[in-house]
Image (cartoon, coloured by chain):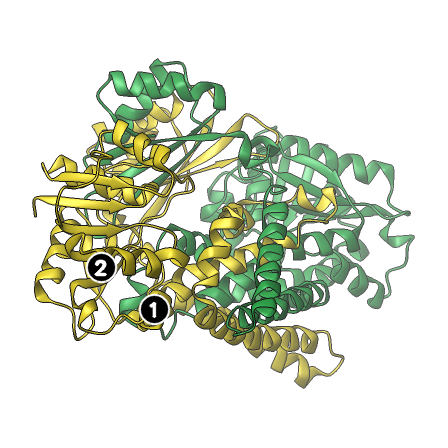
Chain colours: A green, B yellow
């Protein structure tokens, strides 16, 4: 690949362009807002001039609802040898392309893809060539996809240092509904219960609800777009969850019963929901795709002076221990907290002894 | 206060005992498992011998279901001047005490309390005098509670360096249902959807679902106990959430409609759910009780060598910047990741410049 055209210079488009530029590829940038393309060009993502002839690859990086239209226009204009899009849903754009009258033949030069790497911020200024590093990048080839186009896409993914994953378009949409869209809405539904809660209750929030509701802070406009492009699979999952939720409410009501046998059934029902939660949670991949249970935590008491964390990490590094993850639990209304260092189980005694030696207070 | 008796030497009881001991108070330890009391004593939490006469304060730190019984026995045995319990629900024990025939007069020497500081681990070995530091500790005095007993409880809370919060018992139970019990069950319900999911879908999990499902990993036995003691308020909240969930499914189904007006209504419905999620999320207190939005993040690319984090924090410390929170986002299947440093907005340019100067790769 020597030349590329990126259509849509938001976060994803500009980040792809930067990664391609860093490999010496000539990148042309286009956006319905020419100012945005100019900004991306100023950031070193390429040139906002039009290519003189067909490029090797066109990357369609416009919002999901506009992918089919932009793609049809590009393919019919013959602007490139191969085409890919990067929208977060894949079934909708494929159906829209069929509705626009593009047949299998015309679409053999196109492959639908999805890099799994969002950010809270958007736009070219938030972009970076490293945005995709180590993240899954889904490819959804159809039976008619040219091998040459598949290979162009794999080349882009390699340049972006992402990990290619091949999936069926419909399976992809069900998967992102499961691991992203459904949890996002549920996080919002939990957070919504706090909107009109009493301040005295909200004061008691701890790390648990803080984690559950974190993604409820995302931009509603972007999420209306995403959910609008994938409503069926998300609704299916939420309906399954609603059935489990009804069962949970029934089990809790049974626990209020005066009847001993009914209370016993309630206990069983609650226990089963909690067990299934455990069973699902261990499947969530942590760092490096490992289950989170692989690491153990060492808890260190700190106060809130600059340099405290530096000293802990320096002391851990000197002990030869690699800290895999970290969580800071701050005390409410106070200048003190706990740092949970997640490390390989074999490193726990080494780290504990090293930090104690250096005067840290470790919680067992 | 000079003498105390701690009944139940698990995580909370032993931690309270350690805090009291550190202030020079004579602490007697009792447990239905004498070995557990011996372990707590060996950790420096006090003596497992019986007190010779009534102590100043008895701390009832047994599981919620056994609080009323243990308390009635202690009060009728006259083991102390004042009594408090530390169970995570308050309405149930109060009703159970009434059922055991304890009147207002007998209960004037008792106050129900709840320190908001759990851990993933339990038992005396996980205890520490600092467990409660800076955390809310709820007090639920009734009209008949002696002021002397309230002051004994406030003394314990001060010794534990926690923050006292006075609430009505029923309001407390509704509050913990909202900020702890309901989110816990919902986290489990989301995680449960992954139990039988295809591996190719689970591979796509990112930080969002990881955070939403983290607390689903907790011990089901402990949570069956907690939920059994507070089923009504939790069921009420889950029913409200179920109604919102049904509305969300209807909105998503409307988005699948061929009818433009219906699709518009679906968009509005989804937008409103997301808006309410935003509005609730900003109320969740972050560190020091501040809303999380107060901090901004600086993202630094790292590889996975020991000492990388140490260097970042040392460089931040040298720049005089206090890192308020940190999140490590690891790449899937790769030895690289991003560190998100949360800092005061005014510190962002200082930190960004300082880290760039020292050769770090910063994502804008």
Vertical arrangement, residue A73 with respect to residue A299, above or below: below
Q: Which residue is mark 2?
A: B75
Q: Residues within 10 Å of mark 1 (few under 14, many from 20)?
A: few
Q: Is residue B342 visible?
A: no
Q: Is residue A64 left or right of residue B11?
A: right
Vertical arrangement, residue B313 with respect to residue A42, above or below: above
Mark 1, secondary structure of its residue: loop
Q: Which residue is mark 1?
A: B100
Residue B320 percent across, percent down from the top left: 19, 33
Residues B138 and B334: in front is B138
The span from disc 2 to disc 1 (Cα, nearest Å) is 12 Å
Residues B77 and B257: in front is B77
Q: Do badges 2 and 1 share one subunit?
A: yes
Residue A245 percent across, percent down from the top left: 60, 67
Residue B261 is marked as none
Q: Is residue B117 left or right of residue B56?
A: right
Subunit bearing disc 2:
B
């Amino acid at each position: 690949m020597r030349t590329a055209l990126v259509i849509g210079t938001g976060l994803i488009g500009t980040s792809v362009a930067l990664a391609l530029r860093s490999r010496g590829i000539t990148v042309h940038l286009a956006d319905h807002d020419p100012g945005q393309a100019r900004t991306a060009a100023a950031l070193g993502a390429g040139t906002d001039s039009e290519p003189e002839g067909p490029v090797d690859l066109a990357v369609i990086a416009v919002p999901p609802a506009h992918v089919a239209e932009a793609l049809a226009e590009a393919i019919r204009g013959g602007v490139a040898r191969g085409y890919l899009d990067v929208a977060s849903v894949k079934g909708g754009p494929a159906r829209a392309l069929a509705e626009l009258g593009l047949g299998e033949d015309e679409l053999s030069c196109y492959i639908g893809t999805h890099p799994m790497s969002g950010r809270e911020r958007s736009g070219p200024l938030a972009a970076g060539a490293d945005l995709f590093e180590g993240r899954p990048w889904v490819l959804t080839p159809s039976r008619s996809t040219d091998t040459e186009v598949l290979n162009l896409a794999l080349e882009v993914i390699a340049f972006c240092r992402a990990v290619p994953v091949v999936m069926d378009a419909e399976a992809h949409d069900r998967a992102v509904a499961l691991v992203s869209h459904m949890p996002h809405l549920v996080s919002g539904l939990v957070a919504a219960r706090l909107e009109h809660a009493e301040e005295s209750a909200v004061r008691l929030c701890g790390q648990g609800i803080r984690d559950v509701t974190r993604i409820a802070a995302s931009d509603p406009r972007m999420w209306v777009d995403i959910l609008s492009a994938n409503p069926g699979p998300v609704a299916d999952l939420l309906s399954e969850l609603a059935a489990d939720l009804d069962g949970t409410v029934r089990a809790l009501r049974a626990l209020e019963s005066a009847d001993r046998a009914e209370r016993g059934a309630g206990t069983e029902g609650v226990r089963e929901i909690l067990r299934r939660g455990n069973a699902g949670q261990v499947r969530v991949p942590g760092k490096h795709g490992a289950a989170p249970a692989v690491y153990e935590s060492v808890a260190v008491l700190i106060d809130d002076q600059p340099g405290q964390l530096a000293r802990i990490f320096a002391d851990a590094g000197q002990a030869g221990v690699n800290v895999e993850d970290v969580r800071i639990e701050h005390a409410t209304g106070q200048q003190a907290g706990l740092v949970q260092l997640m490390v390989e189980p074999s490193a726990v005694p080494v780290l504990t002894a090293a930090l104690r030696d250096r005067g840290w207070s470790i919680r067992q």
